[in-house]
Amino acid sequence: MISAPKGTKDVLPQDSYKWHYIESAARKVAEDFNLKEIRTPVFEHTELFLRGVGDTTDIVNKEMYTFKDKGDRSITLKPEGTAGAARSYIENGLGNAPLPVKMYYIIPAFRYERPQAGRLREFHQFGIEVYGSPSPDTDAEVISAAALFLKRLGINDVGLNINSIGCRSCRASYNAALKDYLRPRLSEMCPTCRERFEKNPLRILDCKEEGCKAITKDAPRMIDHLCEDCSAHFKAVQNYLKAGGIDFNIDPNIVRGLDYYTKTVFEFVSGDIGAQSTVCGGGRYDGLIEELGGNPTPAVGFAVGLERLMLLMENTGVDFPAERGPAVFIAGMDGPGRERAFALTCAVRSLGGSAECDHMNRSLKAQFKYADKIGAEYVVVLGDSELSGGVCKAKRMADGSVTEVKLEDIPSFFAKK
Ligand code: HAM
């Protein structure tokens, strides 16, 4: 037997309604925030992620699914949605539309990580990206979309943590302070951190090695080195969040695992899903569009991991509304009855109703049982007397009540259910 690749998960027919529920909640939030969907390819040129996500990140260094295609191009399955959305924004001149440009996506993403609960190699994200507004109210708007999405799904016990990691100018002076702090103990740090020391010292704060974590524990914090503009921006974001009734904590340790962030960064974290506790992560990334060759364009967004969200909902007993079965199961007896059942089933469907009939040559009793199992709302039996009399009894499975329906009225009767 060939099994699914490690770190991937099938969504089985009996569970797909949960995905539909989450996805339609995501699309409804998107609609309510006037976000339009963007669909970009599952694979992109590898260079996009090297420049976008950053060549000192774990994602780029260790986790990308990269391969050469038959034309000898280096291709990567997207590890996240922001870089592709930004590439498309530039390539398609989306910035010519009235600003801000607000978009969302629901995508598969791929990272070669060690699988564990809430961490897969193929996973899914609902993300939003807003381009063109440098204002702190837009950070709050994006955060409020994530908060509303989680709230609408009935998720209450997630905490919102926010931080600011500054802009290009204050980052430079912070990097100098961080390097001064780390320099005396650099030889004790892991090889990756030693490399990051020159290229991107902030990334050292994201190292998972225990030894490095101990050294960085008391390192200077970016939040204490913000320039006037970044500091005012961060204060304003907090005020907007308060105005929107969104609770938050300031966590100076958030640096995020991707290099494009500037100013506000945030995470929604849960205590109910184990080590992989971040359900949603995002922030402002005012330099990415320019870095990728576009005009300087401020941007802010987030992505929610849908498998983590699902895990959180299952672990905390949040309800998924039950899936509806067909409006009617039309059971036929013998040749003519079965044929008429098929014809009426087709007729209900052609008027836009949902209907089902037997395809396994079941006895009448077994058809009833099956109809109940698949959650049919009504069952209709077509035997000799129904066929000759032209009238049948529609049994409502929930309460056993019976309604007489003329055979010719079956399609319109059930199309409305
Ligand atoms: P990220 O923090 O790398 O950010 O991922 C966002 C979310 O995706 C995480 O909070 C988590 O729920 C989920 N996730 C990440 N990796 C895995 C995995 N291996 N298995 C399951 N779930 C996972 C980004 O991807 C940014 N693009 C977010 C963003 C959008 N920032 C601005 N705009």
Image (cartoon, helix red, strand yellow):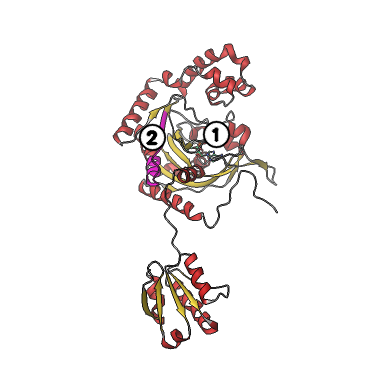
Q: Quadrant of the C terminus?
A: bottom left
Residue 323's place in the image compared with 52, above or below, is: below
- To which quarter of the image does residue 400 belong? bottom left
Circle 2 residue: 139
Circle 1 residue: 53
Badge 1 vs badge 2, beta-carbon distance below 8 Å: no
In-front residue for pair 21/302: 21
Tell me where residue 222 appears, x and y as whole percent. 45, 21
Pointer 1: residues within 10 angstroms few (<14), some, or many (20+)? many
Question: Which type of secondary structure does the marked residue at label 1 adopt?
Answer: loop
Pointer 2: residues within 10 angstroms few (<14), some, or many (20+)? many
In-front residue for pair 227/30: 30
Residue 357 in sight here: no
Amino acid type, residue under disc 2 in the picture = Asp
Tell me where residue 332 appears, x and y as whole percent. 50, 79
Give the spatial CA distance, label 1 vs label 2.
20 Å
Which residue does the image show at 67% across and 50% down from the upper left? 3
Tell me where residue 352 appears, x and y as whole percent. 42, 69
Tell me where residue 235 appears, x and y as whole percent. 34, 26
> Assess mark 2: CB under 8 A from ligand 1?
no
Left or right relative to 379: residue 75: right
Question: Which type of secondary structure does the marked residue at label 2 adopt?
Answer: helix
